[in-house]
Image (cartoon, helix red, strand yellow):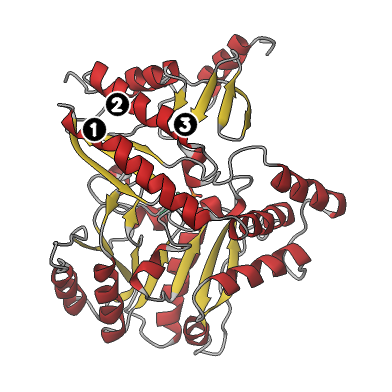
Amino acid sequence: MPLKSTQNLLDYDREHIWHPYTSMRNPLPVYAVESASGVTIKLADGRELIDAMSSWWAAIHGYNHPVLNQAIEQQLQSMSHIMFGGLTHRPAVELAKILIDITAEPLQHVFFADSGSVSVEVAIKMAVQYAYALGNRNKQKLLTVCGGYHGDTLGGMSVCDPVNGMHTMFSDILPQQIFAPQPECNDDGSTNIDELEVLLNKHQDEICAVIIEPVVQGAGGMHFYCAQYLQQLRVLCDQYNVLLILDEIATGFGRTGTLFAYEQAGIVPDILCLGKALTGGYMTLAATLSSKKVVDGINADGSGVLMHGPTFMANPLACAVANASIELLLSSCWQNKVAQLEQQLYKELKPCRSLPAVKEVRVKGAIGVVELYRPVNMAVLQAAFVKQGVWIRPFNRLVYIMPPYIIQPDELSRLTSAIYKVLSQSRGCNSS
Ligand SMILES: *Cc1c(COP(=O)(O)O)cnc(C)c1O
């Protein structure tokens, strides 16, 4: 079939290409994109949509940014890729330095991975290897909390929410990890951390690390929880001699109001995973940072070799654009901007509370969530949002947005009013 018209493309796509979390035989419709610039996504049929998703947390500066384009174009002149085994290069070293400089002081070592899921695999392997090298060979399990999301590879899947996670059918082949209840905080500052401590106490001889998304749990359900929980968790990890892995792949680079969400708790992880917005949404790249303590532990049996090395590790184009993106972020007034987005999201999403389909509205930093009582009918809601000229992709019972930080107030208002309008028009629910 010649791929001349957009319809040809869509037809071929529908027959042959998997999309995320989608059936091959009966996929929901996809929309063909022609280009994207700033916060505008231009569809092949000429329609323009305001982007609410930042391509899943990544495109914090919007699309087609001249500074980021230039960083890639310039790097392309010297090399697009070179193997990282036995070789190194300026973009990777500069990126390592900037990541070490902007994260907590104890984090001094960087492993570059090619996607967020892989950076989580690396974090898990570091923790297991740490315990192993120190002679604690039974400590091979992870403790995590319900409602989490840590990626789609086997190790990451094993610590995703065991029930609501997208991976229940694989549970028999996954490593069996230990799950504490989802973090909950009361108004008086108390939390349900004691339930986690019971498990930590009971299984302390088997657990090498706790892994958790700080402050905001993303794809597992967009749940927010308080910094106190993390402070208590840090104390417990030290007390029971397990490492603390923070997965900031979604929350990193300003999204929750601080550069990294762990800053809100004033704690430091032993291992930190970064991804998504790391390259400003330009290319796939992730990083696993670790402290000297972790490196020393892995070295304790004399080898110190970390058994991992992706082909496209520290890809120079990706590192170059990551450097440019971080510089752009740090030189902008991102803190004010995210605070403004938070205020506007709160003010403009609050009226959704009165809609019958809506269970709760919550806002944290540049993240707005409208939780419904029942799962949305994706096909209907997606089409309704496109009709309103916005790109909002709901999942399950959640209509949520995390727009590029550069979005203007009137553009953000178009997103929030589209949510109100679509949720008040449609029942927004499956009839089943
Ligand atoms: C997206 C995400 C991942 C996985 O990253 P990929 O780049 O999609 O592999 C892991 N953890 C969290 C918290 C994420 O949001």
Quarter of image, res 209: bottom left
Kind of residue at disc 2: Tyr
Kind of residue at disc 1: Pro
Q: Name the residue that disc number 2 marks.
A: 420
Distance, label 3 to label 2, CA atoms, is 15 Å
Where is the C terminus found, in terms of image quarters?
A: top left
Q: Position of residue 100 (x, y in %)?
A: 58, 73
Q: Nearer the viewer, mark 3 or mark 2?
A: 3
**Taking 254 as reference, is 356 above or below it?**
above
| Residue at horizontal 55 percent and vertical 42 percent from the top | 406
Q: Name the residue that disc number 1 marks.
A: 351
Secondary structure of the residue carrying numbered label 1: helix
Kind of residue at disc 3: Asp
Q: Nearer the viewer, mark 1 or mark 2?
A: 1
Q: Which mark is residue 410?
A: 3
| Residue at horizontal 27 percent and vertical 45 percent from the top | 362
